[in-house]
Image (cartoon, grey):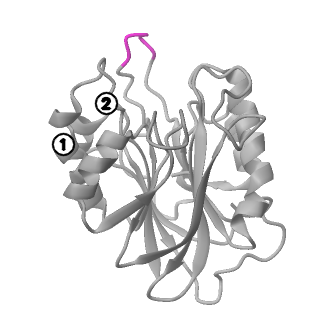
Amino acid sequence: MEITVMSYNAWSDHPAHPPWAARREACAQIFRETAADLAGGQEFTATMLDDLENLLPEYRWVGAGRDDGGRAGEFTPIFYRTNRVKLRESGTFWLAPDEKVPGLGWNARCRRTATWARVEMRETGQRFCFISTHFDHLGKEARIESARLLIRRTPELAGGLRVIVAGDLNCRPGSFPHDLMTREWKDARAASRQPPRGPENTWRGWSRLGLGRARIDYLFVPTGLPVHSYTTLDTPAARRASDHLPVVVRLGLFPGEARANGKIGRAIINIL
């Protein structure tokens, strides 16, 4: 059996960004093009999520606004295709020393969150944990500590299940936060059995700060879970919808492999 997972930063509906009303159909088209079973999102707001609920009735989502734990601020939502995936349990925590309440972490410019979900594949009954996250764009210490916190929390969140992480880490391959993650888990691009497709860079550099393009969006997968393909989606819809390109991965799930053997958070791992 295969499963398709995605990590996607949809570029929030901030007034400084291109209008969401002109981008929302393109965003929905990305989900239709990929038919992702699970997607870890970043920079979604309540308004954007409300619109996508109407445009994509085949999906549901879980998550919380980073500013109040309700509807305020950006979300790191997890979308799941209901005919393929059953939600078992979910939650959101903050990338901060006090992870239970909305707050800034370390030297972060913004509040940052991670959303997790334990899910079950309807066809096979296999279960695993999926995480979506978004590290800070300015705070170097915050990115490092966010990676460490995510690694520490994984055993509790996973509950013995394998874990897949989707996320915008706001750092390039070879940076210390990325290195911490890849000490624990596989970067799906490097693990793909087929040559990666699409551009290497996932962020297109649309910024008044004049920053360059980079690969900052990732999917991390457990050791032993085959990565059949890795794609940076560069379609007309993807170019219209956001300053990030979606990362889409096809994974193989083995019967009887729903529960991980060994130490969770070491040889295995959204969020994403």
Q: How would you classify the magenta stretch by its main secondary structure?
A: loop
Q: Circle 2 sits in a helix, a strand or a loop, which is it?
A: loop
Foreground mark, 1 or 2?
2
User: Which of the 4 image quarters holds residue 46?
Assistant: top left
Do we see residue 180 in this rendering?
Answer: no
User: Which of the 4 image quarters holds residue 269?
Assistant: bottom right
Residue in view at x 65 percent, y 56 percent:
186
Residue in view at x 59 percent, y 28 percent:
136
Badge 2 amino acid: Asp
Q: Which residue is mark 2?
A: 13
Disc 1 residue crowd, few under 14, some 14–19, many 20+, Cα 10 Å: few
Q: Which residues are magenta?
A: 207-211
User: Which of the 4 image quarters holds residue 35?
Assistant: bottom left
Report the Cα–Cα distance between label 1 and label 2: 20 Å
Is 208 part of what is drawn in magenta? yes
Locate residue 177 relative to residue 16 in the image: left or right. right
Residue in view at x 31 percent, y 17 percent:
16
